Structure formats: C-alpha cells, structure tokens
Amino acid sequence: MKFLQLTTISDFVPNNEEVEYLGEWCKNDFNDNTKTFKHVFNTNTKLIDASNLSIKIYKEILPILKEILNDFHNLNKSEKYWEIIFGNWLLTFIQVIYERYTNISEYIKANNEFVTITLSKESFVAPTNYSDFTNKVLADKYNYQLYSEILYFLGFSFSTAELKKDKKQIFSNKKNVPKSLILNFINIFSKNKDNTLSSPYFSNKKNLFKFIGKIYLNDFDENFEFKFKKNLETRNMLFKHSTDNEFINLLFYLFKENFPILYLEGFKDFRHFVLSKDYHVSKVFATANALHNNEIYKFFIAENREKIKLISIQHGGNYGIDTTNSVEFFERNVSDKYLTWGWKENKKTIFSSHEKLNEKIKPKKNGNILYLAKDPLKYLIRFQTNYNSSANRLQYLPKQLSFLSNITNIDNFLYRGYMQNKNSFDITNKVKNKFPNLKIDDHSKNFHSRLREAKLFITDHVHTTYLETLAMNFPTVIFITKEVHSFREPEYFKLLTDAKILFYNEIECAKHVNEISESPEVWWNSDEVQDARKKFVHQYARTSENWVEEWIREFDNILNSEK
C-alpha cells in the first residue's frame, strides 16, 4: 500500500513501501523525483480566495474566543482588547491550518487507500506566543504535529511515532541595554510626551536621534523569564465549541493543543508583570511592528486602548500593493490610523515617507551587478500573492536558473542569496553548483554596502528592497512570475513593464540586462524610464527630506482630532 510522507522527517518511513510526498516541502533534494502531490494553492486566484475566506473565518471566531477567554480569566475585556493580544496569531493560525487541511483533504479525495505514521499525542507541543508559533510553523516537527492532528480529527488511525519535547516552556527576554540607554538619552530632551514611538523599523538606529526633542521613544524592552506548562484538562474544557462547519470545528479541536500558552495559562502572570510597570501613557502611540513580536507592548496597548490613539506604520514592500495581505489587514484593523509609504485607500490611511526610502546611494560606474535572490520557505505561513512557500518551488528556481543561463557576463554578477535557513530550500548552493563562476555574496556586508559597490541592481521578487532602490533612483531590473503575483493597482506595474524595469519573462529580462549592462545609466536616465519610476515611487515609495517633521505633524494632527 502507498505510504504518505507528511514532512521531510523520514526516520519512520518503511523501506519496503511505495512512498508519495504530500508536498514539495518533503524534499531535501531538488532532484528528488519521488511522486509528489500537487499543491492546491498554486495560482494567485486560489491564494486570494483562501485569504479572503481566512479573514471571514477570523471575524467569525474572534468574538467567540473573546467570550471564552473573558470567562476563563474572569475579565470583561472588549473584542479589540483580545484582538491586540492574539489577533495576529489567530489570523496566521487560520491560514496555516486551512492550507494544511485543504492539502490533506484533497489528497484523501484522490487516494482511496494509503498509510502513514502520525506523531503521538504525547509528543505534541503548544507554542508559547505568536513569535514562537511563527518559528515552529516553519519547521518540520511542528508541521508533522499539525498534519497528524488533522488526520486524527478526520477519523484516521495509523501507527504512531514519538519525538522528544520539553516538559516546561520558558518565555524570556534579555533587555537591549545599549539601545535602552540611547532611548533614555533622547528622552531627556523630549518636550512632547503626548506621542510615543516604538519599534519604527529603521535600518540605521542613528536616525532615532532625529527625534530628539520631538517625540517620546519607548521600545517596551525588559528583562523577564516565565515558565509555563500546558494544562490539557483546562483546554479540553474551554474549546468545546461546535458548529456545522467542519473547518471551524477543526480549529477549535486544534486550539486544545495549539493555543499559545502566553494567552491562556501564562496570561495572568504576564499581565500582572506588564501592569506593574510604570510606563508613561501618552495620548498617541505609533509603531511599525511592535504589535507582532513585542508582547509587553501588545498587553500594554490592549490595557490602555480605550484612552489612546494607535497608529500603525507600514513596514514592508507588499503593503498596499499586493491584492491580499493579512498582516496589513490586522494592523489596520486594530489601529486608528495607518501611515503608508505613499498609497491611500481610505480616511484611515495617511501617506508619508519612511527612513528606509531616504537612503542616498549612487551607482558605481565600474561596479558589479548585484543580484538579490529569494529562498522560498518550505511551509506556507500566510496566503500572499508572492513567492511564499514550497507551493512556488517548482516555479521559482527553474526561472532563476533560466535567467542566469541567458546572461552573457555572469562573471560581473554578485549573487546575494538569503542567509542559510534550515527551513528553506538552500537555493544559493543549488545556484552555486549550477554556475561555479558566479560570485556568491558571503553576507560580510549589509545590503546597502553591497549596493554601493554596484552599477545595476537585479531582483527576482518584489518585497522591500526594490522600493528602496527605486526611491533612491538606483538602476533596477526585476523579474517575477505573473501567475503567482497579483496587485491591487496593476496599472502602476504596467508602467514598470513598459519601461523595461519589470519583466514576467526571465529570458527577455536577461536579454535586456545583457544590452544595458555596460552602461545601465544610459537606459536608466531616459525620459521614459524616469517618468515611470517617478510615478511608481510617488504612489508606493515616496521620499522626503523632511520625513521626521511630517511624521510629527501627522501624529499631532491625530492627537488633536476626534477619536
């Protein structure tokens, strides 16, 4: 009988069975020809539909969890309170489970008989918090658990295997003392404590000094250590909710083992710890990403949400651009205002600039060609219309290799791949083996330092760096896969394709690079290219010499407006 392998973990796979992989994430070797089930979410349309459904389910489940947690913790907090505490985890968890559930369900429909080995329930672990979850869900062991749990829920019973786990989980943080001293020094001169800025997503920490005397800075960074233990009896009692929707029932079934401990068993102690801190309560709080990974900040903001105004600041290149973006949805949903890099959708969004868009780097006339690559992760973590998991593995690497194969001056390239990640496919080494003469960046210098040594920048994905290079007017060429990507306002990307900045065909892109590589500035400084660049940058990557003053002005406007 056919044996279904669920993850890369192959320790328990019988030697005498015909093996089939559930997905590309099961492969360690790109040349592995083992039969592999086709990924369900392999087009931008399917990704968008799945994202929209996930948000719909999120809105349905959040008020139910509010009631459950209020009862358990003997509180009477609002839905917005709990959304700030764990909304980012919940929305991500729904997307992760919907993808895993759909994959395994479609496989079952296509295969009447199969066997596998599931992970024993004794080996199950619960994530500590949102950050711990996002780390776990990229790794094989936790995905082995999730697929096993889904099979249990669907009524399957297979042989089981055990993996070691920690009996107690430690949630700790070590304070960044040097940065704390810098913030405290800046705050000595602060005349305005009505506005507090936290975790602004700056590339250069020196830019914090531009806020001297203008704003209060607080990163909510403390030393702490908590030890938690999952109480399965309590969890089984809490998450008994049942509906006529199988997927929602699955979510509540999975909450029993997977609801983050910090928001359940550890909630009371950690909340008490945060409330014991004498933080200044400004009237306006602004942050780029503290609402995701800073639990002190999240708890503090949730406790004070009804008496403050909250501003979220864009911190990436996909916001306002991709057709769907669940991270953006969460940030905009919990905030009063959203500070963007140029785009505007409604009264809640305010366009401005950002530190990342105001770096001034000029191309080096006799420099190299810097190629910034991506290394898609094995496991999907969110439904996004870009290269975001092994769903795109069969599209990404062949396209990349095809591009490089058609380059005539590859000796002049510096290939900057992602730093080695055990949860990705190690694309860099595969490229190195294929092109031994290609120079590989050792990451001894940061991106901006490498850019200063280049005359042309090339990338095969549209995240943050291409907005930075377009904003600084650095010669840039991009190639991506049309079937994967989807944009809210495609007319702006047509400007880039018409100007030969953006390509969907990697061979055409390579031909263009070959033509301009000797003197890319001639092409780049043409009226057509500059006109397209300026229009695109005005919409998505605005620059301003006075961006700090603009931020302060917007914060003050929000402070003085009615909530």
Image (cartoon, helix red, strand yellow):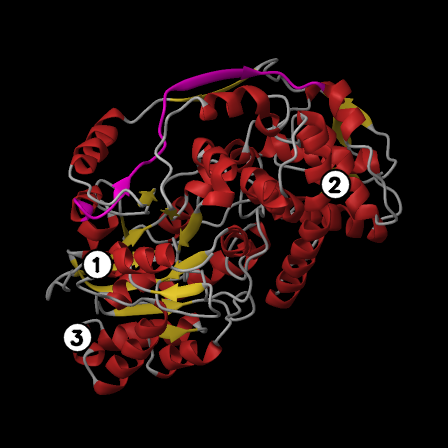
Q: How many marks?
A: 3
Few, some or many C-alpha atoms within 10 Å of disc 2 (few <14, some 14-19, many ≥20)?
many
Query: Does residue 219 show up magenta in the picture?
Result: yes
Left or right, residue 375 beside residue 408: right
Quadrant location, the N terminus: top right
Q: Which residue position holds label 3? A: 521
Query: The residue under label 3 is which amino acid type?
Result: Glu
The residue at the point 59 percent across, 45 percent down is 80
Left or right, residue 246 beside residue 479: right
The residue at the point 21 percent across, 45 percent down is 204
Marks 3 and 1, Cα distance to the nearest angstrom? 33 Å
Q: Position of residue 377 (x, y in %)?
A: 51, 46
Q: Which residues are magenta?
A: 211-231
Q: Nearer the viewer, mark 3 or mark 1?
A: 1
Place residue 363 in its image quadrant.
Answer: bottom left
Q: Are marks 1 and 2 in contact (CB under 8 Å)?
A: no
Few, some or many C-alpha atoms within 10 Å of disc 3 (few <14, some 14-19, many ≥20)?
some
Q: Which residue position holds label 1? A: 549
The residue at the point 19 percent across, 43 percent down is 191
Q: Which residue position holds label 2? A: 251
